[in-house]
Image: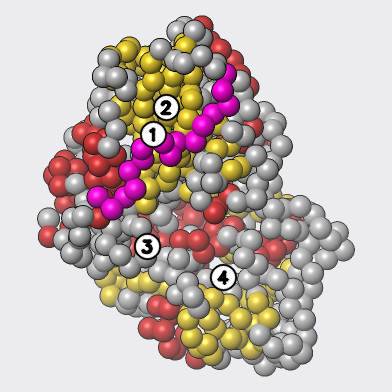
Amino acid sequence: MPAFTGPHVDPLHFQQCDCPTLKNLRPSPPSDRRSPVATLHLRLLETTDMHGHIAPFDYLDHRCPRQFGLARVATLIHAARTEVPNCLLFDNGDFLQGTPLSDLPPLPGGWPGPHPVIAAMNALGYDGVALGNHDFNFGLEFLSNALSDARFPVTCANLHPLGKTRLPAAPTLLLTRRLRDEAGRLHDLRIGVIGVVVPQVATWDRDHLQGRVRTAGITETARAQAPALRAAGADLVVMLAHTGIDDTADHPGLENAALPLATVPGIDAVLAGHSHRVFPGPDHDGLPGVDSADGTLHGIPAVMAGFAGSHLGIVDLRLALGPQGWRVQRHRSEARPVQRTPGTPPAPADPAILRIVGRAHNQTITAMGKRLNTTRIPLHSYLALIRDDPVTALINAAQTAAIARAVHGTPAGGLPILSATAPFRTGGRAGPYHYVDIPPGPFRMGDAVSLYPFPNTLTCARITGARLRDWLERAASGFLRILPDRPDQPLLDPRFPGHAFDTVSGVTYRIDVGQPARFGPDGALIDPDARRILDLRIAGRPVRDDNLFLIATNNYRAAGSGPYPALGDGDLVLGPTRQAARQVRDALTHHIRHSAPIDAPRDTGWALCAVPGASVRIETGPGLRRHPCDMDALAARDLGRDSKGFLRLRLPLGADAPLANPPQDP
Ligand code: MN
Ligand code: MG
């Protein structure tokens, strides 16, 4: 597979890592001052939120090798194992979804063999694996099938199956491992492992899980399971916690619960994840209870290994055997990066892992290259947050067409069909190259995946005009307020991710960013008098509060996500229908395959209002420079790149600005 040849890699890279010695492990509070009978060093390794990234290869853009992925982490795993006498390897969930390689097997005829992600994980000898929320994206049957090939035990303690449902996971694990102490003697230790997942999974994936599982809170689950494992003989209890670290107060539905989890008695280490951050590291500095220098949450050793195989998490424990059994005496946490600094060579990919996924890898490349249609225009998302964009329009057109077919001849069939979607690749934390950019010419399967990277399912609900206006006001919170007669005002609120910016097709409207936002980026009502949505019309007539519509959207939005509240179950016309759960991406490829070649949308659905005398600044991908016509059409001025590599643009927003006065087709 020539695609794997990366830059020259210094084979000494790993020997430069500062390997831990016991003297630089951090001390725990002394519980027993008599000298212990035995001491041993146990290392816990963590991967998390791998999201199907195995080979260091971008299936949507073959040009550059990726600087992360499990094949590269595998090299760190091998090195970390040689540094210590005793080592256990865990994964913390979200391994099964996220790349064309991992998302191919669920497709009809996609991949006949064992799931390539599971096959790669089998080769690394995991001691235990927890389930993440995304591992449920393709349904329980698919998950069970994929895990039937797993040669590692799986734990999930806070999802309880209902009725005849079977979960392909045990609530907890009790592993027995023969470990070598510092004097060379062997001891059998029992390690209790508790997997927990964010309880939101039951809502986000309710198409698959409604009526089939009951969820329990993360900390309440740990409070019950840790003493149970101790009573069953565990010498040590490790949390495989698919949950992030933030300072929200604990409650049963808490999503990011790693901090309160660390206060649960009887837990010796917290392996965290889900939020795709790194711990120890500056990502969580300043949070109460977090000590990044010590690598602890409320004094308990913890780690979070980033995202997509960016890091290997390491927790080193020095255990002492005293009259009370084995106790953690010292500890040390490290998130070891695959690439130490940008621009330096990353860890090389383990050739054994590449061999294992080789055939699925090649089939994925073939599948992504399958031609669906032709596009006559470039399709890019560099401007998708500031204009009615062809990329979002295409997704909305596909959702509308799929719903029109689904409701045809039903009682809901007479209502106007609207569609809401956000653009999914708009830079942000994923960086200046995380954009759609498809040139005119063949439109392939990989391009559809680039437009819609997630296996979200299609949902449709009945809504009123009032609810529609509320929806759009929430989306309009993505803009900062722009004052008249001031140059260079930042336009986009950095707290508002691009994937929360829904645009709605089937109606027309304007967004007045000169007004204050009605809602905050979290959806909280901050100014009940504020209105940014103007001229909301359907077929030229003003939308009334009591007008009724159907609106197509995805399962996450329907369940309530970001600034949007959940749609009422009674309003859903489609979904949760786990038998018929259809991926939006499937609707998109169907629509493109059966449509005329892709061309510029004929009319504009929404635009910003002018703010007299104002100009605004945005950051977008430098790839926009390949589309000078689009820059000229908005009178955008190129201000060069910022320190992260984003392209800075200045855009006029005054009375005659093209951004505020898009051309209308006569
Ligand atoms: Mn994840
Ligand atoms: Mg997750």
Q: Nearer the viewer, mark 3 or mark 1?
A: 1
Cα distance in 3D space between marks 3 and 1: 27 Å
Circles 2 and 1: CB atoms closer than 8 Å: yes
Q: Secondary structure at mark 3?
A: loop
- Residue 608 lies, in percent from the top left, at 66, 77
Residue 385: give its label: 4
Task: List x then y, in percent, for residue 416.
Answer: 62, 57
Camera-nearest residue between 408 and 491:
491
The reply to whether the C-beta atoms of the residues labelled 4 and 1 are less than 8 Å apart is no
Q: Nearer the viewer, mark 4 or mark 1?
A: 1
How far separated are the C-alphas under marks 2 and 4? 51 Å
Q: Earlier in the sequence, mark 3 or mark 2?
A: 2
Say whether disc 4 or disc 1 marks the residue closer to the N-terminus. Answer: 1
Residue denoted by label 3: 341
**Residue hosting label 2:** 318
The residue under the point 55% across, 62% down is 498
- Tell me the magenta residue range: 15-31
Residue 246 lies within the magenta run: no
* N-term mark: 2 or 4: 2
Quarter holding residue 86: top left
Distance from the alpha carbon under mark 3 to that under mark 2: 30 Å
Contact (Cβ within 8 Å) of mark 4 with mark 3: no
User: Which residue lies at the image location 48% right of the left edge and 24% below the top edge?
Assistant: 328
Disc 2 versus disc 4: nearer the observer: 2
Does the CB distance between marks 3 and 1 fall below 8 Å?
Answer: no
Residues under labels 4 and 3: Cα distance?
A: 31 Å
Query: Of helix, strand and loop, which one carries label 1?
Result: helix
| Residue 291, image x, y percentages | 59, 43
Is label 4 within 8 A of ligand 1 (CB to nearest ligand atom)?
no
Measure the alpha-carbon separation of dots 4 and 1: 51 Å
